[in-house]
Image (cartoon, helix red, strand yellow):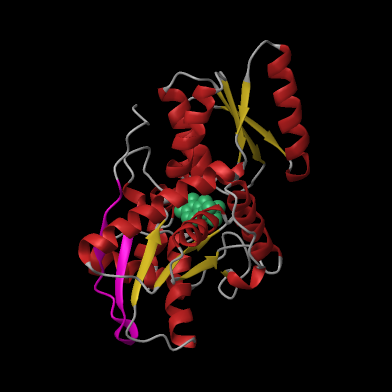
């Protein structure tokens, strides 16, 4: 696997016409590594760093539905670097991401949610004692390196704008750990652009959710000699979280089916489908009309298949 030169992902127009806005989608789900997605975009930079630091063991963590764990396990396998995934016990059915993570030969360590940090520490200590140079990646690829990945994505968006003469008024996307949003905001600050970047939270509530994005933005820009920004500049929207991580409703399932039938774009219940539904609601509530809107498809294609039966059986 050559992780060095990955191409820009396509931006295409959608059929969606809500409130006379025009809608486009950036297909980060089509990044050409392990079913794509924002975790692939971030992982590429983490592995470059790992190679530079001459590390030889990867340690990370995530839930069973984690796109991050699947991608880290796949790239590790491809580079023949052993990989340990720490994952909290769950009683639900194994997801495709979990099955794929196993297929890629990752060493999976199960523990209770409360034991995650101690298990990470123990694992790293034991590897060091065994003579390895472990490389730890935060869950979801959080941190300045993950932020950098979305500064790059922001630059791809600018290139598209100058090539097509379509300038986006809004960028919407799913916000989880906030790294994707932080990278987009940093890109905007670096170029001094006037866009609204709206992160639709899939789990976290405010003020915590916004605060984490703010810390990520400021950590990144201060290192580049820019002044820190204030939290009011961050649109971290927690109105569409429902009951937290993994929860969804009938409208989300309906939205997923509509976008798939109209434009052939698969979205999932936990991340992209939820945020796309949230985007529509946000546009209605805030009476946004006649604007150019970009939705970033942050990936999670295996999760689409976890929801397929329900999509077929729902009304
Ligand atoms: C992890 C994930 C997100 C959230 O990204 P953050 O950078 O953590 O905010 C959004 N969409 C998908 C498909 C993801 O896997």
The quadrant holding residue 233 is: bottom right
Residue 13 vs 30, above or below: the answer is: below
Q: Picture coordinates of residue 39 (x, y %)?
A: 47, 45
Question: Residue at (65%, 63%) from the top-left corner?
Answer: 209
Q: Picture coordinates of residue 152 (x, y %)?
A: 41, 48
The quadrant holding residue 265 is: bottom left
Q: Judge left or right: residue 179 versus residue 303.
A: right
> What is the span of residues highlighted in magenta in the rendered image?
8-27
Asked if residue 103 shows in the view, the reply is no
Question: Residue at (61%, 27%) from the top-left corner?
Answer: 135
Q: Judge left or right: residue 92 versus residue 296.
A: right
- 13 drawn magenta: yes
Q: Quadrant of the C terminus?
A: bottom left
Residue projecting furthest to the top: 131
Q: Picture coordinates of residue 262 (x, y %)?
A: 24, 69
Question: Residue at (34%, 58%) from the top-left corner?
Answer: 157
Residue projecting furthest to the front: 225
Q: Judge left or right: residue 140 versus residue 301.
A: right
Q: In this orientation, which residue lies closer to the viewer: 260 or 161? A: 161
Question: Residue at (58%, 57%) from the top-left corner?
Answer: 178
Residue 4 vs 133, above or below: the answer is: below
- 312 drawn magenta: no
Q: Quadrant of the N terminus?
A: top left
Q: In this orientation, which residue lies closer to the viewer: 61 or 286? A: 286
Q: Picture coordinates of residue 28 (x, y %)?
A: 36, 51
Asked if residue 129 shows in the view, the reply is yes
């Amino acid at each position: 696997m050559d992780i060095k030169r990955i191409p820009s992902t396509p931006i295409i127009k959608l059929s969606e016409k809500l409130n006379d806005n025009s809608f486009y989608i950036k297909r980060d789900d089509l990044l050409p590594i392990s079913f794509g997605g924002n975790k692939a975009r971030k992982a590429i930079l983490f592995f470059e760093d790992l190679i530079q630091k001459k590390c030889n063991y990867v340690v990370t963590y995530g839930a069973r539905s984690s796109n991050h764990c699947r991608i880290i396990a796949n790239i590790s396998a491809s580079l023949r670097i052993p990989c340990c995934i720490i994952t909290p016990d769950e009683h639900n059915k194994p997801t495709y991401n979990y099955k794929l993570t196993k297929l890629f030969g990752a060493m999976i360590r199960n523990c209770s949610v409360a034991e995650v940090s101690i298990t990470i520490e123990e694992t790293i200590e034991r590897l060091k004692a065994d003579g390895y140079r472990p490389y730890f990646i935060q869950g979801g690829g959080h941190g300045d390196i993950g932020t950098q990945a979305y500064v790059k994505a922001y630059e791809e968006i600018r290139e598209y704008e100058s090539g097509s003469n379509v300038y986006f008024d809004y960028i919407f996307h799913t916000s989880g750990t906030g790294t994707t949003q932080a990278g987009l905001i940093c890109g905007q600050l670096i170029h001094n652009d006037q866009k609204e970047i709206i992160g639709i939270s899939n789990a976290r509530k405010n003020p915590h959710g916004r605060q984490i994005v703010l810390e990520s933005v400021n950590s990144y820009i201060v290192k580049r000699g820019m002044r820190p920004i204030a939290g009011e500049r961050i649109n971290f929207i927690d109105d569409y979280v429902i009951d937290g991580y993994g929860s969804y409703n009938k409208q989300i399932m309906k939205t997923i089916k509509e976008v798939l039938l109209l434009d052939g774009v698969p979205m999932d219940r936990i991340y992209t489908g939820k945020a796309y539904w949230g985007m529509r609601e946000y546009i209605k509530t805030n009476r946004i009309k006649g604007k150019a809107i970009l939705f970033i498809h942050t990936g999670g294609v295996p999760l689409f298949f976890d929801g397929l039966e329900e999509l077929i059986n729902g009304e």
